[in-house]
Image (cartoon, rainbow, N blue to C red):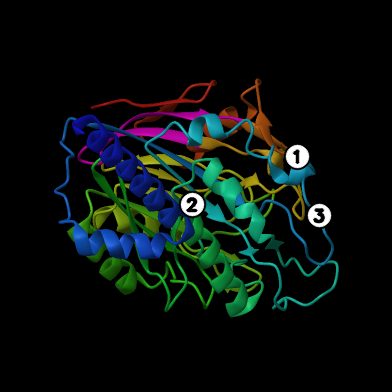
Amino acid sequence: MTGFLLSFLAACTMACGTQHEQKVYESSDAAIVAEAENDTPSESEISDTDTLTIAVCGDIMMGTTFPSVQLPANDGRDIFRDTREVTERVDLALGNLEGAVCDGGTSTKGTGPNSYAFRMPTRFGVLLKEAGYDYLSMANNHANDFGAEGIESTEKVLDAQGIKYSGIKGRVESAVVERGGVRYGICAFGHNSYTLRHRDLQTVKRILDDLKSQSDIVIVSFHGGAEGRTKSHLPQGAETFLGEDRGSLREFAHFCIDNGADVVYGHGPHVVRCMEVYNDRFIVYSLGNFCTPYGMSLTGISAYSPVVEIRINGKGEFIDGQIHSYLQQKGVGPRKDPSHAVAREMKMLTEQDIKGSPIRVSTEGKISVERR
């Protein structure tokens, strides 16, 4: 009898566990609410001596169905083949979702072949989860390509995959991702009217103050700067592109760190830019195109697609890092770059644009700091 009862209870426990996992997959929001009702929030387990690994990348647009269907082979299953070994391994992986994830809607940018409206099919959402992404910024100039319908669909897809997001004004201002007992607070800013704007420093500070109160590590994503192959260098002061103020990005990044951010990563110019360690915190000013197999130029430096992996301590201070170099191929996605061309480009830009910085980059992409 005892053996029978034990077997019965074990079977019930396994069934309950299976049901819980299925419930989480089907509705992450419902699962979060249920856990909040039943569990007491745990205290952070982070200490100043801990080492945390974070990977950041640039624009992700996994193919488009508008105005014509241009999708990678094997229904996209191979696009992150070379990069997922990094993004799956680290404690936290982040990027920028450049476009709407939806199956319908009306383009807000016209219908011609040069409309530059990007629409990824909803079934591609699982590819982001399989690649290991924990958070994706929506504060960019393509999140609204299919209006409110596209934004709502994108959020629903990311919710279903358990991927956090933020950046659209009036919707989700910030996100907290907990991994390994560490709470990462993440926010995103852009230059469009529907995004939280990086030029609105009052709002930036308010969001950072809120994240500091509920997080161990604070990370800021921004979409800014002029675009194109001639815009690799980070200028002093504000940048204007197509008649639009794209922000003073040095000022913005330093402001974020001065107000509690530990990591700042940028995207938007479609080319890579320099890196900086400011007040012991890491900044990368542009990560360029990352996974954009169609709809964008992939010639020359526009094909440079890094994943930048960094290590920080429990205080958020930069320890070291690695530029993982990839080159994009049209219709395929990022592939390993054994020549380290991407790392060498970012090394050159860092040396030229960040004068007097303690940051050092090897030709193979190793990032270190000379401590004074």
Residue type indicated by callout 3: Gln
Residue type indicated by callout 1: Val
| Residue highlighted by disc 2 | 266
Label 2: state its secondary structure: strand
Residue range corresponding to the magenta coloring: 308-325
| Residue highlighted by disc 1 | 332
- CB-based contact (under 8 Å), mark 1 and mark 3: no
Specify few, some or many for label 1: CA neighbours under 10 Å numbering under 14, 14-19, or 20 or more: many
Q: Mark 1 or mark 2, which has the lower sequence index?
A: 2
Q: In which quarter of the image is the C terminus?
A: top left
Residue at x-position 72% and y-position 79%: 106
Q: Where is residue 76 in the image (x, y as percent from the top left)?
A: 71, 45
Residue 70 bears which disc, if any? 3
- CB-based contact (under 8 Å), mark 1 and mark 2: no
Q: Position of residue 296 (x, y in %)?
A: 74, 53
Q: How many labels does the image show?
A: 3
Label 1: state its secondary structure: loop
Q: In which quarter of the image is the N terminus?
A: top left
One can see residue 200 in this view: yes
Left or right: 364 as drawn, with respect to 123: left
One can see residue 221 in this view: no
